[in-house]
Image (cartoon, grey):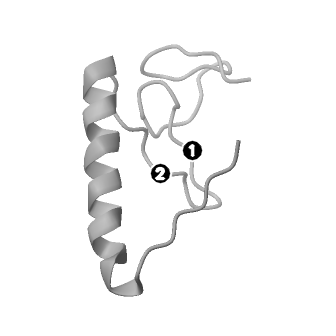
C-alpha cells in the first residue's frame, strides 16, 4: 500500500512539528525513548538500546551490555 501526501511548501514546518509530536507521543505510550543520532565517522556509534556512546567492551555496550558484534 502506498500513500502520497501533498503539502503546500508554506505548511511543511507545521507538518513536521505535527509528525514529530505524534512520534514522541507514540514513543511515550510504548515506554520508549528516541535513539541518539548516528555517530560521525571515526566516533563510536550510539547503542541502539540505551543510546550510550562509548567503545564496545568485548563486543557489547559498556552501559547496558547489549551484544553488538
Q: Residue furthest right?
A: 69
Q: Is residue 46 left or right of residue 23?
A: right
Residue 17 position (above or below residue 56): below
**Residue at the spot 52% in from the left edge and 31% down from the top edge:** 48
Q: Is residue 68 left or right of residue 11?
A: right
Q: CA distance from mark 1 to mark 2?
A: 9 Å
Location of residue 42 by image quarter: bottom right
Closer to us: 40 or 18: 18
Q: Report helix, strand or loop for mark 1.
A: loop
The label number, if any, that marks residue 37 in the structure image = 2
Coordinates of residue 17 in the picture (x, y in percent): 27, 61
Mark 1, residue position? 45
Residue 38 position (above or below residue 5): above
Coordinates of residue 15 in the picture (x, y in percent): 33, 65
Q: Is residue 36 left or right of residue 11?
A: right
Answer few, some or many: residues within 10 Å of disc 1's Cα (few below 14, many 20 plus, some between 14 and 19).
some
Coordinates of residue 63 in the picture (x, y in percent): 42, 21
**Residue 31, can we see it?**
no
Q: Report helix, strand or loop for mark 2.
A: loop
Coordinates of residue 9 in the picture (x, y in percent): 41, 85
**Residue 58, can we see it?**
yes
**Residue at the spot 27% in from the left edge and 22% down from the top edge:** 29
**Which quarter of the figure is the C terminus placed in?**
top right
Amino acid at each position: 500500500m502506498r500513500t502520497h501526501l501533498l503539502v503546500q511548501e508554506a505548511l511543511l514546518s507545521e507538518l513536521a512539528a505535527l509528525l514529530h509530536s505524534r512520534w514522541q507521543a507514540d514513543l511515550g505510550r510504548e515506554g520508549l525513548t528516541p535513539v541518539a543520532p548516528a555517530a560521525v565517522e571515526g566516533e563510536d556509534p550510539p547503542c541502539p538500546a540505551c543510546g550510550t556512546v562509548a567503545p564496545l567492551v568485548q563486543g557489547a555496550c559498556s552501559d547496558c551490555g547489549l551484544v553488538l558484534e
